Image (cartoon, helix red, strand yellow):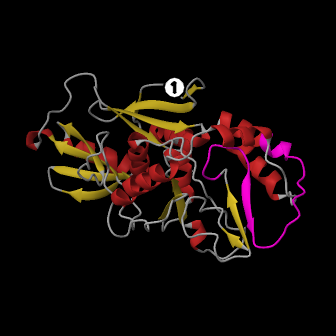
Amino acid sequence: VEDCVHALFTRGTGGFGDFALYSFRKFLPVPDGGLLLSREPVDETLSPPLERFISLKTAGLLSGSRRLLEEGEAALDADDEAREPSAMGALLLDRLPWKHIPEVRRKNYAFLAERLRLPPLDDDTVPLGVPLRVPAGKGELERRLRAAGFEPPISWDVPRDAPSDETDRLVVLPCDERMGERELLKMINICASMNEKKSGRVPLYNKGGLPMPEICSQITFFYYNDFKRARDFYERIMGFELADDQGTCRIYRVQGTAFLGIVDEKHGHCSAPRGESDVLVTLVTNDVKGWWEHLRKEGAKITSELLYKPEISIEAFFFEDPEGYALEVQSFLKPELRKIFGQE
């Protein structure tokens, strides 16, 4: 049996097996349907379409519900009948244009491969997607892609307790005919934000398709009249890790590649605030109440009550540092945002 379900339009496939199987729905905008080529006579009796799969798949595509899509695939996996295509699938297959699809897929693959530093396609290959190896594991990148509206065309799950292998590091990026340059650039920037390439960071691209200069981390600088007091606040009370001591400037690691710098205003580019702070720095945490109690104990100037805002799904409170800069401690409550901002 020659498995050609990922190679519907690729030349040179289907020639060596006694049986060759192709899938329409992996390449064409149809809910079901496939092709069997056989060197031997086969029983052409087909069962009726699997309506549960069709209903779940259609509902999942229309609503964007991954749960419905997965339930549909599970229903199909549990079925071992040879079935007729659905009426909708047959109608779409007969009516929809498809001849442009191979060329567009190859063009999109080349666009992604060039910017993600991946190998080019063979001449006769029409890709289902663009394989990208993520050394740290595929989970976070797939989550970010789905949150942005991109569904990987293949996503194999490693069985529980199975030894780790390449399947949990491989993400297949979509490159189908519905995607234009704007969508491709957005997807490239999501991949670049993961910063997992061993050969160097993948560059960001602007909306015009031009590569942007690299950004490795981010520092916010505050300026102080009483530099010694500011040092005590951020080192003793906030407990931030000192990353660089420049004498009249100290830079602290807040988390990961997020940094906060404090500067003696007599030696800095800007000035200390003269009135109400025009800047707000937000610290994201899973323990808003813990920070509230810690800062109250240390005598910090807390400027709000503990706040629960269900309309935007956050918990938070506000406080000020010794010279009036505004800070916030906040927790996101939506699961998708908790993952984006490092709470999970």
Residue 96 can be seen in this image: yes
Q: Is residue 71 left or right of residue 256?
A: right
Q: Quadrant of residue 337?
A: top right
Question: In the rendering, at what x and y percent does residue 302 appear?
Answer: 43, 30
Residue at horizontal 77%, vertical 47%?
A: 72
In the image, which residues are magenta? 26-55
Q: Is residue 194 left or right of residue 86?
A: left
Residue 63 covered by magenta stretch? no
Q: Which structural element holds mark 1?
A: loop
Q: Quadrant of residue 5?
A: bottom right
Front position in the image: 233 or 148: 148
Question: In the rendering, at what x and y percent does residue 252 appear?
Answer: 30, 52
Query: Count of labels shown?
Result: 1
Q: Is residue 325 left or right of residue 54?
A: left
Question: In the rendering, at what x and y percent does residue 257 appear?
Answer: 35, 54
Residue at horizontal 43%, vertical 65%?
A: 121
Front position in the image: 143 or 288: 143
Look at label 1 and name its amino acid. Answer: Glu
Residue of label 1: 305
Question: In the rendering, at what x and y percent does residue 111 appear?
Answer: 37, 53
Compared to residue 224, the image places residue 261 above or below, namely below
Compared to residue 10, the image places residue 335 above or below, namely above
